Image: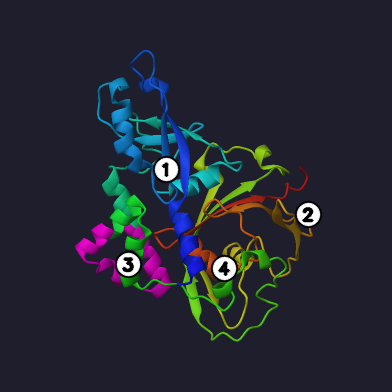
Amino acid sequence: MERGEKEAQQYVWDGAIPLQIHLHDSEVTTLPPPPPALILAPRIGYLPLLSPQLKPFFSDALPPGVDTVWFEYKGLPLKWYIPTGVLFDLLCAEPERPWNLTVHFRGYPGSILIPCDGEDSVKWSYINSLKEAAYIIHGSSKNVMNMSHPDQVELWRSVMTGKLESYNRISAKLKLGITGDKFSGKLNPSSLKGQPSVNETDATAAPKASRIPVRLYLWTVNEDFDDLEEAPHFDSWDQISYINRPVEFTTEGKYFTLLDAVKSILPEFYPDSLKTTKVESEDEQRIEPENESQPGIKLLRIQGIEPKMEIPFSWVVNNLMNPDYFLHICLYITAPKPIGA
């Protein structure tokens, strides 16, 4: 692994989000109410894993009953199996620091969230994602299923504690590496501006196909906005399209970009006849169709980063994927107004 890739991976694993967590008013039984808990939550972690820190902090204020921890943001129950960093990127178009969340220990919303029994539920959700990723990459999940119990324990522990070196040692046995190319191996991010797309540039790399596990969280916004602070807030998961669709590409000497990957995931937004123009500045970049009636990307965020759309997709995958071997992409798209509206 290149030194730059190691540094990028470590940057992702060290990423954390400052949280200010309030106990819901309906569960406060003391006066004065307890202050909010301040926690630095790992981006690659999961909210239920914060329970060991939160329960002692709020225990004196809780009413009698059985604890079932869940979180909400502005009234929206948060899906516990989505990594914390992905939730933050998706729900906060304009990053909010600290991120103000509300924790509940009672009244689990079973009609909205699937059951969670603490760390065990999170662990098995992670392992199942790993199996799914292995199947997408190699057509079989047997390497994950045949992991020894000590390796499985160490792999999960490395994710919980953010130990990248331990994770790399165990995950290497799964042989889930993603194919690279001559471009991503020597990537200089500052030189990416203006690079041609997959249809324009030839190289000499040997053809090799890759299937990339991708989870895309798509929010289609009906109202256009110029500033992220003006982005409308959504209050229901029904407004988010959850797309679990692998990206397949072959090097074949071609320069396959992040934009090429997005087009392959969302072909309904990018028919072959659609021509796009690129709008760039030092502070922002978005891809907008020449035809105003077509959708346009307002925000694409991965691991808290808004990468240029011309960046090599293989570099993005190798450096910004989560420990479950999925690349989680948060995408805001503006949709055209209905005819006659």
Which residue is denoted by mark 4 in the rendering? 313
Disc 2 or disc 1, which is closer to the eye? 1
Frontmost residue, 230 versus 312: 312
Q: Nearer the viewer, mark 4 or mark 2?
A: 4
Q: Secondary structure at mark 2?
A: loop
Residue annotated with mark 1: 41
User: Which residue does the numbered mark 2 point to in the structure image?
Assistant: 292
Quadrant in the picture for the N terminus: bottom left
Compared to residue 298, the image places residue 262 above or below, namely below
Label of residue 169 in the image: 3
Q: Residue at x 57, y 38 (%)?
A: 234
Q: Quadrant of the C terminus?
A: top right
Estimate the spatial distance between the alpha carbons at disc 4 and disc 3, rounded to whole Å: 24 Å
Q: CA separation, marks 3 and 1?
A: 24 Å
As measured in the structure, the alpha-carbon distance from the residue carrying label 4 to the one carrying label 1 is: 27 Å
Q: Is residue 136 magenta?
A: yes
